[in-house]
Each structure stands twice: as C-alpha cells, then as structure tokens.
Amino acid sequence: MFLDILFGILSAKIINMIGGEDLDLIILGLSIFFALLPDIDVPVELYSRKGKLGGKTETHHRQLTHYPIWYIPLVIAVTYYFGIFWGFLLAVNVFWHFLHDLNGTGWGIKLLGPFSKNNYKMFTNKDGTQNLRQLFIKWTPAELTDTMQKHGDPYWMKNIMFNPKSSTFWFEVAIPLLLLPVIVFLVLL
Ligand SMILES: [Zn+2]
C-alpha cells in the first residue's frame, strides 16, 4: 500500500514532466488513487471479516478487481474521454500495482482471470517462500487452497507486514513511509 502511494506520486511527477501538464494536487491524488485502484476490494474484506485480511482461505480480496483484463477497456475509455495523459497515468499505475502484487506479499493474482482461476506469482516457491530464480509460479485453485491451509497466516499483518523482524516490514512499510515526506517535498518543489 505505502509503496503504491509512493509510486503514484513519482509516476505523476514523471508523466507530468513528459506530458507537460501542470502538476497539481488533483493529478497527484488521482495518480495515487489509480495506483491503489485494484485494492478497492480491501475495505470490503476488512469490513466483512471484522478487520481480517487474507489468511488460510481465499476471500474477496484479489479476485474480480485484480483481473488485469478489465483495465484495458477502462484505459481506452479514459484515454478517449479525458486524453492520453490520463489514460497513460491510469495504465502505468495499474500496471505497477499488478507488478507489485505479483512480487510482494500474498499469493499473487489471477493474471488470466476471468478465463482462468489459476494464481500466478513471481520469484516465489510453491510454498510461498522467496526464490529469485523462479520467474513465475502457478497455483491451481486446489493447489492454492492446499498451500494456504499449510502456509497461510491469518495474522500476517501483525506477524509479517508490521513486524520489524521481517524484511517485508522494511520494504513495504518502513522505507516507503520514511521516503514519503522526502518524495512529496521534492515533487512539490
Ligand atoms: Zn492489490
């Protein structure tokens, strides 16, 4: 989430420099919104599961809103109605979000949904541990159910995401949060 926000700010600045639009808070805000857009399923899950996200079974998160194919007509429509600057800003941020989900926490995404229910992830072993030599891995729904039962952690936010002993905490939370004010300052200069 914090990495996505950081990317949203940086991409707004870079695309603004290329596209020549005046960078303002609307562009910055929408760029961050685009970088987080597929995660609109997170509040739904947090609400329906009383504050829990992920764990040992598949739920709402990373289903429909994480099928990349939906974003192709959306990018075309945004480009058609609002221009290439906005279409490009949306495309770059959503592409980043999926690249992040294919690499970061969790069990990847259903890259070919709705045509395939298989999950894909990069640089990961079948048990979810990191393996930089394994470019892509696939879990069928049955394999994913089995793997989540064995290796899923219902308290991963406490045990991994917000645990200073885990590298995930530093890459996903601490470093992005430390960089955030610096990047905002540099971008708004
Ligand atoms: Zn996501």
Image (cartoon, helix red, strand yellow):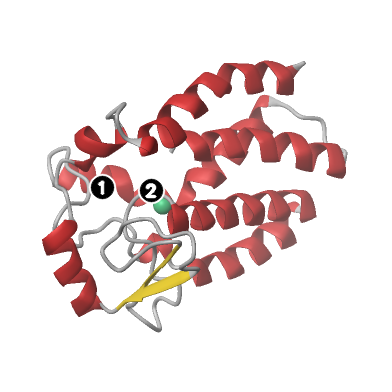
Residue density around tag 2, few if under 14, some if 14–19, many if 20 or more, within 10 Å: some
Q: What is the distance, in whole Å, between disc 1 and disc 2 at their CAs?
A: 7 Å
Q: Give 109 or 39, whichever is nearer the viewer.
A: 109
Residue at (38% x, 56% y) in the render = 130
Q: Is residue 137 above or below residue 98?
A: below
Residue 101 disc label: none
Q: Residue 59, percent across and down?
A: 20, 59
Residue 84 occupies quadrant:
bottom right
Query: At which x and y percent is residue 100?
Result: 49, 51
Q: Is residue 84 left or right of residue 104?
A: right
Q: Residue 153 location in percent, x, y?
A: 16, 49
Q: Which residue position holds label 2? A: 40
Crowding near the residue tagged with mark 1, few <14, some 14–19, many ≥20 C-alpha atoms within 10 Å: some
Please tell me in which quadrant of the rendered image residue 163 appears.
Answer: top left
| Quadrant of the snapshot with the C terminus | top right
Along the line of sight, which residue is nearer the eye, 2 or 18? 2
